[in-house]
Image: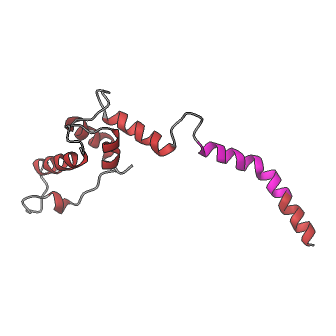
Amino acid sequence: MKGIVFALLLLTLVAAAPAIASKLAADQPAAGQPAQPEKKADEFFKKLDADADGRVNFEEFLNGWYKVGADNVSFKPEDVDVNKDGKVTWKELHIHFKKKFDEADTNKDGYLDKKEAVVLFNF
């Protein structure tokens, strides 16, 4: 009986091997291609970098956040509400984002490079 179960198990594995191999290959990047998280980060950075100069200024950051990054940047309204009136104004939101931008700009050049932007947007 054990021999039959083993044989059936072995046949099942042999039959499933091509599908398993195909799935594993699909999960791996092609030779010379970046890994999936890096590819996602590259695509995201390209969307932020509107003028394609390899860096993101504050205006690009704000526009990009509205277009592609809103789900990746979280904040608590009470942290943004500077005057604590229970409302978040555009000015307060702008101040909050400028602060986040400046914190992410670790080399203090006034721009976010890919590494800085990816960290800020939690990739």
Rendered location of residue 50, percent (x, y):
29, 30
Task: Report the colour scheme.
Answer: secondary structure
Residue at 60% x, 46% y: name it. Answer: 27
Residue closest to the eye, 22 or 35: 35
Query: In screen coordinates, is 50 left or right of 2?
Result: left
Residue at 28% x, 55% y: name it. Answer: 74
Residue at 30% x, 27% y: name it. Answer: 53
Rendered location of residue 14, percent (x, y):
82, 53
Q: Quadrant of the N terminus?
A: bottom right
Query: In screen coordinates, is 4 left or right of 43?
Result: right
Name the chief secondary structure element in magenta.
helix
Residue closest to the eye, 54 or 48: 54
Q: Which quadrant holds residue 105?
A: top left
Span shown in magenta:
11-28
Label total for image: 0
Residue at 12% x, 62% y: name it. Answer: 86
Residue closest to the eye, 64 or 29: 29
Query: In screen coordinates, is 122 left or right of 82?
Result: right
Q: Which quadrant holds residue 63?
A: top left
Tell me if residue 24 is in the magenta stretch. yes
Rendered location of residue 44, percent (x, y):
38, 39
Q: Which quadrant holds residue 42?
A: top left
Residue closest to the eye, 78 or 87: 78
Rendered location of residue 112, percent (x, y):
27, 39
Tell me if residue 84 is in the magenta stretch. no
